[in-house]
Structure formats: C-alpha cells, structure tokens
Image: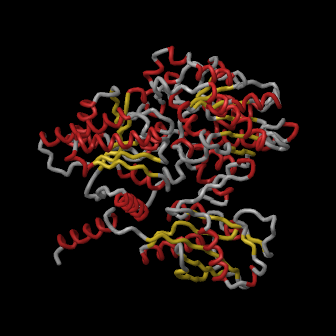
Amino acid sequence: MSQLQQRRRREKDINEAISWSGRSLTTIYAGISISHLDYGDSRAAISFRNSAYLLDYVMFDLPAESSLTVCNRIVSELRTYSEKHKEKIVGLAMPLSLADKYPSLCPQLWRELDILPLVLEHKDRARADTDQGELATFSSWNTKELDEQADSMVRKCMRSFGVGHVLQGEIGLGSLVRVDRNFRLRLADLEDYQETVNARTWSITQHYADELKRRNVKIAFFSLSSHGRPGIHTRHSLVRLLHYLGVNVQWYVPKPRPGMNSIIRKMQDTLEGMGGRDDSITIEEEMCILQWVYENARRYWLCEDDPLQARSKGGADIVVIDDVPLTPAALLSKQVDPGRPVIFENRLQVQQSALQDAKNFSTPLWDFLRERLKHVDLVVSQAPKELVPDIMPQKKVGYIPVSVEQLDGLNKNMSDFDITFYGREFNSLCRSFETPTLNYPDEQYILHLSQFRNLDETITVLNAYQKFRSHCMDAGMNSPFPKLLIYHYGPSRSSKSTLIYDAILSHIETDMPRLKSCIYVMQIGPPDQLWNTLLTKARVVIELSMCEGIPAMLLAAVQKGKPIITVNEMGHFSFTKGVDNILFFQKGEVDTIARLLTDLWTDPQLSELLLPGPRRLRDEYTTVGNAVNWLFLAAEMSREGNAVEPEGKNIFELAGQRAGLCF
C-alpha cells in the first residue's frame, strides 16, 4: 500500500471515529472501591452496570505511590474500558473515604473523561429511619468483598440519574436547593477555580471569603426556579464555589402552584416589552402572586432558623432576590428584621424598542415592581445601564458583568470522544423528531439560539439564511452549503412558545420547502454537554434576541472563539468590547445578515480573520469574578449601619478598590 493510500486510509478512519452519523454509544454507570493491604499497596475494583444489568468488573493493584499516580491509573483503566467496549460511562460513585484520600480524582474524572463523580458517605451499620439522602449504610460494609462494595456504589449511583442519563435535581426541606445533589457531586476543587483567574483576583476572593467566614455571615438567595432557564447555571456555579470557599450560603425556591406559571410568564413578557396590549396582569393576578409568596414564606422561610427570620433567631444576614415575582419577600424581610440588607438582582432584559417609550414604564405592573423595591436596599443588574429602565435612584444601583462557568458541562473543554458521543446523541434526537440527521464533520452548520418568545427574530434568521444560499449559488461556491440549526435550550416556556414553534415550522414548509432538509428546529434540554458540543463545532453563531441567558450564551461563544453575528444593542455589554470576530447589524436587516454570512463563506481571508480560536476571558466574566461581586456586597452590607451606594458603577471594580488592590 502506497503512502498516499495509507494517509487516505488514516483520514477515513479518523473521520469515521468522529463522525456524528455513527451509532450512538451505550451509556453505562460505574462504582469503585479500594481496599488497603497490610504492606502498603492497595487493590481496586470497578463495577459496571447499565440501566438493567450488571455488566462487568475490573480489578487491579495500586502500588503505594503518590496520589497523582493512583488517580492517573484509575482514569486510565476507565478510559481503556470505555474505548474498548465503545461505551460511554456517565457517572461513577465512590466512598467518601476514597474521595478524601485522593481529592484530585473527582475533578480529573470530570475534566478528562466527562464522568460525573458522586461521593457517597457510608456507615458500618444498618440504615435507620432518620437517615436521609444517598447515605450508603451496610451492617457489614468492612466484611464485604471488594467487588460487592463496588457494585453497591454503582447501584446507588444509578438512582441519582433520570431519563436520558441526566442527573436529577434535588430540593430539600424548606425549599432549599441542594446544588450538585447536596455537594455529593464534585466537579472541581479550589485549585481548578484558581487557575481560571489571575493572582490578584484570587487574592480578593480569599480576602472577602475569609472575612465572611470569620464573622459567620449567612447569605440567602431566592429564585423562581433552580432549573429550566438558560441563566440559572450562573447561580449553580456561584453557590458551588462559595461552598468550596467555606462561605455560609443557601439558595431557596418557592413551591410551585398550579396556574402561577402563566401569570409569571405574562408578567415577564410585559416587563420586557414582549407582551401584547392585553397581556398586562390584572389586580386579581397581582393578589395571586402576593398570596403565593406570603404562603411560601409562612410555611418555609419564617420559622426558627429559616432565612427570612430575624438574624437574632438564626435568619440570614443578607437576602438576595433575583426574580420580580418574589420581590414581595423584601417587605417580609424588613418587617421581621428592619436592619437586614435586601438586594434585588434585576434580570430583566427590556427590549430596546420598549425603552424608547416612557409610557411603557408607567403601567400598573411597573408600579407594582416599584412599590416592592421600596423595601430593597440595593439593585444590581447584569444588563448595562443603556438597557435598564430607571427603577431605583442611581446611587442604589450597581452592575455585575455577565459571567460563565468554565468548569461545568456547558462550557468546559471536551475530548473528541465525548464530543462525538453527544453529536450522535443529537442525531438520535433528530431521528426522534423525524428530521434529517447532521453528518458532521462533512456538513457544517450555523447556530441560532431561540427562546421562542419572538417570532419575528427567528423568521428574520430564516429569511437571511435563504438569501445567503442564493448569494452563494450566484457566486458559484463549490463547497457544501452549511445547514441552519435553530436551537431552543430547556423546556418550552408556554403555550405561546408552542405557537411560535409551530409557526416557524409552518414558515419553512410554505416559504422555503426546498430548504426543509437543511434546517433543524430543536427543543432540547439537558445534559449541558449537548449544548456545549453544538456550540463548540458551530461555524458561526447568529443571535437577535436579548432575553435572559442569551448574553451569557454569547459570552460562551466568545470564549470558544466563534464568529458571532448579533444586533447592535448587544454591543452595550462590556464583554463584546475589543472582540474582532463579533459582527453587528441593525435588528431586522435581513440583507445585512445574508451578506455577512456570504462573506464568511466566500472570502477566505475574512473567514481566517474571524476564527481566532479559544480565548481566555477577563477575570470579571468568570465564576470567580462573579463571586467577588457577591462576596464584596455581603461583606460590606452585613456590617451594622454600613450602606453600599455604587452610584451606577461596576461592583467588581469597587470590590478591588475596597480590598486595596485596584484594577
């Protein structure tokens, strides 16, 4: 065989290995246990199961060497098994004693193999009625064989996963969000977070964290939900890091009630300027919101040691509310403890068209919000001041930049093996929806994230794609045309979203039937790595929306070095400054989008210029940078009689100045 034939054969094998058109890998789970021998060495056992059966065991010796060597050996055994059997290990459970002895093992499993590492405490006794959660209890744990211990771990691991090998969320007593299944899931350690920022930012983080620990300051966050929203990952990441730092932080969500979702959605659409004339909530609906919040507070948040109880009775020292419907809780907090600081995190992304008309902010719903904000000490916003209405005096308003977590499933770096796995999972979903599959890498694609809240935006993208195809044909482009992927992350928001989804499909059927096989309209939820894969391999990202979570998704695209085509209003966000591969246009300009896409595909020099590759984000856009904001606010505002007045400034910069390390 000639060298040319050998090279072509290797290229073919590589393409087949990374092609998304191959068969989906079987998902399995693992459990591990280690016994320490008398002469210093150890012996490890790993048990493998699928959703129904015990599949296999692997046993091997571990010499008495360094922790790094042991971790590398375990990772190597798991990688070898996965690649040999063409199976994807989703999660692995281990005893607490093993995780404590080798603390770098869990982050390494997540970082290198995309395995969710669950750490389970075990007791050498029978289970009691008072035991809660994933506590592994055995009346004879130490007398069991090593393979029995490993099999017990994998069986308990499987209980934590739901349909689609997705880790189940957990809400505890008092509607307390148990992040990472009450931190039994260990995705990273402090060293991993320290590597994402420079030494000065890490020093500031430790400075404020140490102060909060020394004074035992309690922070309580209140949100509408702990899942299902694009921006909610930021809160998971923040609570995770603060827990690792030893800060006393709790996160609460209200118990759901039938009928409340439609009122909340109507409220959000109206406030953001996306609702119709008849969408404003009624007095009766306002009363429903007040009653719902007060009932949740009475049952879960106002008893002894609950977060809204007075500080002298075990309540939180700082209360943070990040959703408009929960703002009535600010009054409850002040009634119980008038001196306790309350912060409102404004997550509203008001449309530019609505900001231009002052009449939009004199409606009863805005009056409802302003009345509740009278009991708030500070408002912080992720949106820049150009996109935020005046709802508080400027001296009580501060700004926290958008941030992303570099270590979670949405944004972490993944191996080709794992990217191929999730690419094939995507094609499995395509088959379920009876749509054509995506034959990556032979077929490239354009990615558009849609929340299905504004039909005109998605229709604009579709029309621009149609014109782009025509321009490329006129230019005689020989390479295959890219496909268009319209992606909705998370569950459908409402019946209105379903109508928009149906209208998009109808538009494709009637106005561009010849392009039907090239356009994907997908509503997809977890796992997060699925979105990560699609963003990582996208050729270009188009975004017209300003909805909650969209700026963070674009920041993730900036981090991955993707060319971005977006509206001029997005240029107000600081993370877009100085980024050469972001192309702006006026909303609604179909021809401009089509021209930009055509230039990207037909001009090699421009295409090369707009693909700089992954970039390191500035510290303020990371989880550590986000934590600096909240640590600073908690430290300053928890001091008796000490008010914080940002005067419309960046909280991250104020934190550095107050810590004596000016940026």
Q: Position of residue 332 (x, y in %)?
A: 77, 31
Which of these two is toward me, 93 or 177? Answer: 177
Residue reaching furthest to the front: 284
Towards the viewer: 189 or 125: 125
Nearer to me, 197 or 481: 481
Question: Residue at 53% of width from left, 82% of height from top?
Answer: 56
436 sits left or right of 561 in the view = left
> Which percent across, then down, holds residue 191?
62, 53
Q: Is residue 572 above or below residue 115?
A: above
- Colouring rule applied to residues: secondary structure
Using the image, determine if residue 146 lies above or below residue 525. Answer: below
- Residue 574 visible in image: yes
Q: Quadrant of the N terminus?
A: bottom left
Vertical position of residue 543 compared to residue 228: above or below:
above
> How many numbered discs sit on the rendered protein?
0
Q: Is residue 95 left or right of residue 531?
A: right
Judge from the rendering whether residue 605 lies leftward or rightward of residue 548; answer left or right. left
Which corner quadrant of the image does residue 62 belong to? bottom right
Q: Position of residue 338 (x, y in %)?
A: 81, 27
Q: Nearer the viewer, residue 416 or 283?
A: 283
At 29% from the left and 28% from the top, the residue drawn is 589
Q: In the rendered image, which quarter is residue 569 located in?
A: top left
The image quadrant of residue 11 is bottom left
Mark yes or no: residue 661 visible.
no
Looking at the image, residue 172 lies above or below residue 639: below
Question: Residue reaching furthest top?
Answer: 358
Q: Is residue 322 left or right of residue 213?
A: left
The picture places residue 142, in percent across and down from the top left corner, at 75, 81
Q: Residue at x 34, y 60 (%)?
A: 431
Question: Which quarter of the rendered picture does the C terminus lie within?
Answer: top right
